[in-house]
Image (tube, rainbow, N blue to C red):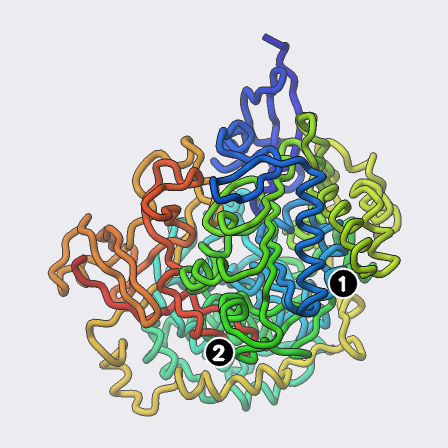
Amino acid sequence: MSESVTRYAVCNLCEAMCGLRIEVSGDRVMSIQGDENDPLSRGHICPKAVALQDVRDDPDRLRRPVRRTADGWREISWDEAFDLVAKGLARTRKLHGADAVGVYLGNPVVHSLGTMTHLLPFARMLGTRSRFSAASVDQLPFMIVSYLLYGNQWLMPIPDVDRTDYFLIFGANPAVSNGSMMSAPGIGRRLKELRDRGGRSVLFDPRRTESARLVSEHHFVRPGTDAALIFAMVTHIIGTGLARPAAYVHGLDEVAAALAAFTPERAAAVTGVPAETIRRVAHEFATAGAAAAYGRTGVSTQRFGALCQWGIQLLNLVTGNLDRPGGTLFARPAVDPIAARQVEPGHYGEWRSRVRGLPEFGGELPLAALAEEIATPGEGRVRALLTVAGNPVLSAPGGDRLAAALPKLDFMACVDFYVNETTRHADVILPPTDLLERDHYDLVLRMFGVRDTARHSPPVFARPDGARHDWEIFRELGRRYHRLTRAGSPLDRLVLRLSPLRLVDLALRTGPYRLSLAKVTGRGVDLGPLRPSLPRRLRTRGKRIDLAPAPLLGDLDRAKQELIPGDLERAERELLPGDASQLLLIGRRHLRDNNSWLHNSPRLAKGRPRHRLLMHPSDLDARGLADGQRVRLRSRSGEVAVEVSASEDIMPGVVSLPHGYGHALDGVRLATARGIGGVSANDVTDPGLLDHLGGTAALNGVPVTVEKA
């Protein structure tokens, strides 16, 4: 046996960016532990990082390109695969126009250095407006509000959790996510440190989550009504004279007038949160020494997602907690793509989807429109599709409809190392190297860190003979596609020729800290706590923040009509209006899951079943159901059968089903779900139930019924 060697790396499975200490012997992983010297994660690690070795050793993982034939998948050479993909995409463009070629970018795209540097230039080369990504599934409201308030979709204020006195959380579960759109690994330790210094943390969520057990207090809130709760807090703060916005913040009077109808009493009637609790928490937040409000998936993936995120920013802005230590601040990463103008600042509604007229944002259309754009005949129909690192059949709203639409494509190619519910429809699959076989530097996620750090991780293992890195795949596809179409700007073709490390080194040398790749390689560089940077860092006209952008004000009427009760007394008696048998569905995530994948890892799949529907005992009793029974969950758009579990941790009138399960096709369980049962919540998510502003699917607050299967 070879002598054991220690390697240092960064886990790139989620946004936490945890530093790893990996013991290897030859080509085998002996152990994976947290790196206590990493300046951001400080030794924290979760079970998913340990499972990185399972991906590397998985016998079901693709290691060579494959082509779908009548007799099944056939391994082909890289040269044949590149030609098939380039010609398939070019042929569709020539016959039907550039927009007939669709592109879908999955969540892992931002977690891969080579994909970030080389996929985007190749996608621009395709010249299509039919671009979709995972952003419109759960984070688009964040991006829209950042664009409208701060002038750039990526300029997102980060809670300074390590110095705050009061942490107010809406619809987020950082104990499991480690802080989505807020990279805060080891959040449990950070919340304990907050409590030890005399601070408080308050969480509003329809489920008593893992995070609820760590905070000072938790309150149930009816799904889909968070905007009323948040706006009532803003109204109370302004009305009691506690507002103190910065000099560059304008529009307070306009906001006060627009939100006047959202009183604590009216919010209490629809949210289930007592008015006195709304007033108390708002007062505590406004009078704390330093406070930070934050909301994530639960408030983003609902019909008023953008309004919720606007309200959260208003809480920080009107109390003077934006750009304040202990409040919320903008990160200053060593590679600053905003300052270097390397990312799209954002634009809204410059074109719309062909079938439903949904608006684009930042050059992408809502994923909820993809199935209909493929299946609906007519000029401009998507006829070819390239998916990268994603499984939209399990993550898109109405995923079963997308599964039915994909076979109607003329051509489909995927960059992925698994055959899954989505890639099984492809003509060609091109597998890149795995996460331990390539260099890594987080180009995007460092913009969300609760502390500024920089770290480049060399590969833990040399790539196998004949394997290709993701950036090499896009470079070669770009070269062949340009030869066939002459498409692509000179700058994009130049970027495709350079290596990711060369591009990162250039960016570090010209960045705010004047670093280099050599200086950040290894165990990370600590660049210090987040620092005030406003108004200089704003990308708005005149370096001002307008609290009341027209698109957000324009959507308020819809919220008032649906969330402000006309008859207050009746609303308080009937918290759940309509059919008494109706429940509201919310999603949930697990620490041992990574969206729709890693269910094939034995070390992660073991233990109690995690795919079950959670339901309050009183709701079970009212329907004559029992714990563990198989039930039928039905919505307007679909139905699934699943086992139910009784739980006091779920709000009465609410049920919860996790995202990304299922993994069964034609009675055959996929390799990506070895030993895991369940269904995908997205099969009962209505792709017609959207946040009007950006087209984000309402994954939470879906009206459903539950009965015996």
Q: Secondary structure at mark 2?
A: helix
Q: Secondary structure at mark 1?
A: loop
Residue 555 in percent (x, y) is at: 53, 84
Residue 559 in percent (x, y) is at: 45, 83
Residue occupied by mark 2: 231
Q: Residue at x 69, y 53 (%)?
A: 444
466 lies above or below 580: above
Residue occupied by mark 1: 533
Q: Label 1, label 2: how many angstroms apart (C-alpha)?
A: 27 Å
Give the left or right position of residue 609, taking residue 111 as reference.
left
- Residue extending furthest left? 624
Can residue 555 be seen here? The reply is yes
Query: Could you say which is closer to the camera, residue 464 or residue 272?
Result: 464
Q: Which mark is residue 159?
A: none
- Residue extending furthest top? 1
90 lies above or below 464: below
Image quadrant occupied by the N terminus: top right
Q: Residue at x 61, y 89 (%)?
A: 253
